[in-house]
Image (cartoon, rainbow, N blue to C red):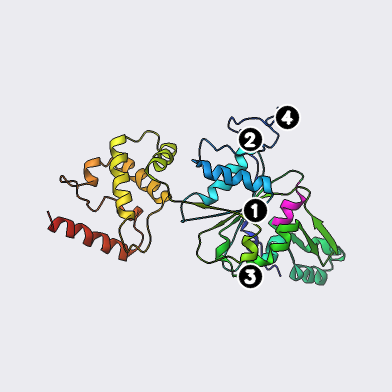
Amino acid sequence: MVRNAERYAPFTYTRKPNQLRDFRAIKMSKSSDQPKTRFDGSASYVATDDLKLAVNAAMALQRPLLIKGEPGTGKTMLAEEVAAALNMPLLQWHIKSTTKAQQGLYEYDAVSRLRDSQLGDEKVNDIRNYIIKGVLWQAFEANEPTVLLIDEIDKADIEFPNDLLREIDRMEFYVYETRELIKAKHRPLVIITSNNEKELPDAFLRRCFFHYIAFPDADTMQRIVDVHHPKIKQDLLDAALKSFYQIRSLPGLKKKPSTSELIDWLKLLLAEDISPEALYSQDEKIVVPPLHGALLKNEQDVHLFERLVMMNRNHR
């Protein structure tokens, strides 16, 4: 039952961008307003060849694309960039621990109908006035293909993926209150993200094309940084990346710093005009970097890192 509009906050709709970047036109039409048929990357998102191949494979198979990877590796942003690159509307469903699969289809607002009946409102005679369309319904009735993002599916309970099997597989569902079958006009490109916090059911996995976004190596990270901080000096970037990867390799870390946290840290280093020399000692041994609170988000990790630095100093 619907008690207030806040329950539907996870459902967000993003319109197509007014201005798109220069991508290859599809053979079917020369118009830039037509959806593209392949994802070739984006100027603002560094996608590896394997990732681009995975997106295109999911489109060819007409299967949901399941993306796993560490938090902060750009899984959610991928859906946004794919929608922009393919010139398709983006529908987003951000999953919470309390989210139920039915909310993605529709909900019947019985409370509002009861209140309106007590007030003598004539619209109570049409039950359709109290059917709240979910994000899947919106995608199914769209007049053009859409990109549908189901974000962080592993936050929901274990039954959530299974409850969506039929709808995602057959692209249809039944509305019992109105006794109508809702079928998709166009099959959306479904992108599902997971932080790998819990295992997903095998039956659900069989219906997906899977791709794991590995943590970027130094060369790929350099390209990512160039997108966000194109004017950063190379000596500062080299020192920052060296310090960053050493922190990530520290055994026993409870939470390793992510790509997004590196981008934030570099932004702070530039804002505070930190020199490359501040990131390392004269003998090239690691030091506690300035503004390390952007990288280490747990007091245990901070203490562990500080102990390592002290041990290095004692062995000079």
Mark nearest the camera among 2 and 1 is 1
Kindly identify which residue carries mark 1.
64
Within 10 Å of the Cα at label 1, are there few (<14), some (14-19), or many (20+) other Cα atoms? Answer: many
Residue at image point 35% right, 36% down: 232
In the image: residue 32, left or right of residue 143: left
Q: Earlier in the sequence, mark 1 or mark 3?
A: 1
**Which x, y percent locates residue 136?**
71, 56
Which mark's residue is nearer the viewer, 1 or 3? 1
What is the crowding at mark 2: few (fewer than 14 residues within 10 Å), some, or many (at least 20)? Answer: few
**Disc 2 target residue:** 18
Residue 34, how many percent across, how many down? 71, 34
Name the secondary structure under disc 1: loop
Q: How far apart are marks 2 and 3 (CA)?
A: 39 Å
Q: Distance between the residues labelled 3 and 4?
A: 43 Å
CB within 8 Å, label 2 to label 3: no
Q: Is residue 253 above or below residue 35?
A: below
Q: Name the residue under label 3.
A: 159
Dot 1 or dot 4, earlier in sequence: 4
> Which amino acid is tagged 2?
Asn
Question: Mark 2 or mark 3: which is in front?
Answer: 3
* Mark 2 or 3, nearer chain start: 2
Q: Which stretch appears magenta?
A: 136-142
Label 4: element kind: loop
Q: Residue 29 carries which label?
A: 4
Residue 198, relative to residue 75: is it above or below? below
In the image, 187: left or right of 304?
right
Residue 257, picture quadrant: bottom left
